[in-house]
Image (cartoon, rainbow, N blue to C red):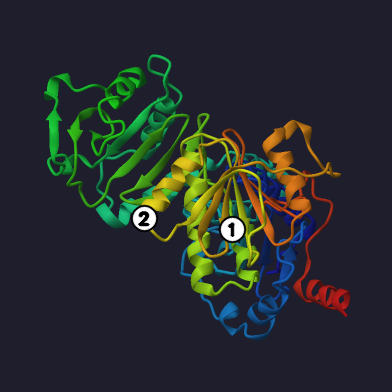
Amino acid sequence: MTKKKTNFKYIFQCLSDTLEGVQDGLSHFSGPSRACAIFIIDPNCPVYIFDPQNLLRGHEPILEDLYLEQNKWLYDFQFPNYKSPFGHLSSESNLKLAGLISMGGRSRPVFYQMWFTEHHPDMCSIGPTERWLEHAAWRFSHDVANESVLYTGISGSFLREYAAHAVRDHIVDYMNVALGWDTQLRIYPILDTILEISRTQEEGSWPRGKLIFVENRDLDVPSYVARFPEKETPLIQNAKHVCKLLTTVEKSHRALISDGKRVVGIADGNLPDFSIVADYRGQYGFLGMNTELVCSFADGNFRSTTHRAKLVQVEETLLESDIDPETCNLLFQTISSLVHYAEENKFGCTLVVDLNWTPVSISGQKLDKPLDLRQRRFFQLAYSLLKVDGAIHISRDLNIVGFACLLDGLAIEGEDMSRGARFNSALRFSASHKNVFIIVVSSDKPASIIQEGVEISSHCQYQPVAGFQSVPEKLTDWIENANSAHS
């Protein structure tokens, strides 16, 4: 029997369409995201890489060691006996490379594949993204198994809209371990309900409070404050009614309890071993399992974001300073807490973090003695000082040396009049003062980190592109090109 010739042109088309769908979908779920894949069609083929936006650049040494040198594990694999030409996908776990999320699998059509994307610093959980990449591997294998004349390109379109499915798959995997396969909780209807409630206002206010879903056999476990008669339990699909009931639990330790079909009562503790928690916080909210966050939701969509400022550059700046590690960590935790408090309470503020041994002089409200933020009473006071017009001035030794500070300076290039006085004043002041960085928190925009007249906030410096122009290349060539560029 003649061995079928590998149609690489068709395979590369499948890969390109799938990758474009994955990247576009993840960019909506987590913010601008790159994606790439490493794959082997069969054991006699070389290792290929498709990385059109250089996501894996910088990881060449570990990839070379993993796939080209210490690669006995890669080929020491036997597929289970099954008759189907496609069969099933044997999952390959996350490689846990720095700054990356990866998942893949093996199947008869594609001997090995591993998909990669960014690990954004503000993700609630990497679980849904792992399921996303895992499904991309399944789709790619399925398309390769088909004939090219049957190819529709639907995989890319489906993966572009995969957010709710990824969240559902992650929850189901966790739930099956916790409860077993015999459960009456139906995740898709629950997710639809959570989003519908999030879009519903009650007397002009967005919902706040917790709605907890538990398995029917565990309904007697919660400690109920009030329970509704069985024949008069509100239906969970009535979003308006549920929003009214949420007003009874907002700003409290209480929560509404549901079996996925109806609201059975109000509880204030003692939950079962597994529960799905929808925590509504106004215009956005969080979805979790027990105490583990899964994702957030807003505007009728699921997102991976924690809705908190990305303070990566703050941490890096502090680590690069001459502050001792213990103080550095305390300073970062203090700054993070103050910024997140302002974000959660929806007000703007400015923090001047002064790394000079002698703090710079800033006009504003001076203090007879600095306030030591290591002391709880002063730390609590700092939350209130943030609300006063002007900036709060924090020294390298965790002291507040002033508040209501006015940041002045000469006009500089790069100012953005659309960002307002707080942002541009920070640009001007930081441009004329060394060893100072400024965090500007807006009530309706992400926090900005400014140093030496430039915003250094963590954000992607690239934009994902549609319609990839490059084609996969052999991993050996890709690494050789990288080495040549560095030499």
Furthest-front residue in this view: 368
Is residue 468 in view? yes
Seen in the image, is 115 located left or right of residue 487?
left
- The foreground one among 172 and 226 is 226
Question: What residue sits right under mark 1 in the picture?
Answer: 119
The x, y position of residue 436, in whole percent, is: 68, 58
Q: For the residue marked with disc 1, what is the amino acid?
A: His
- The foreground one among 465 and 250 is 250
Is disc 1 placed on a helix, strand or loop? Answer: loop
Seen in the image, is 288 located left or right of residue 299?
left
Furthest-top residue in this view: 203
Q: Which mark is residue 266?
A: none
The correct choice, above or below, for 263 with respect to 87 in the image is above
- The foreground one among 92 and 288 is 288
Q: CA distance from mark 1 to mark 2?
A: 34 Å
Of the residues under marks 1 and 2, which one precedes in the sequence? 1
Mark in the foreground, 1 or 2: 2
The x, y position of residue 43, in whole percent, is: 65, 75
Q: Quadrant of the C terminus?
A: bottom right
Question: What residue sits right under mark 2 in the picture?
Answer: 376
Seen in the image, is 326 located left or right of residue 215?
right
- Asked whether the residues under the numbered discs 1 and 2 touch, taking CB atoms below 8 Å apart as contact, a structural biologist would say no
Residue at 23% of width from left, 36% of height from top?
A: 254
The x, y position of residue 242, in whole percent, is: 31, 23
The correct choice, above or below, for 436 with respect to 61 in the image is above
Dot 1: within a 10 Å radius of its alpha carbon, few (fewer than 14), some, or many (20 or more) residues? Answer: some
Number of numbered discs on residues:
2
The x, y position of residue 272, in whole percent, is: 20, 48
- The foreground one among 305 and 414 is 414
Is disc 2 placed on a helix, strand or loop? Answer: helix
Dot 2: within a 10 Å radius of its alpha carbon, few (fewer than 14), some, or many (20 or more) residues? Answer: few
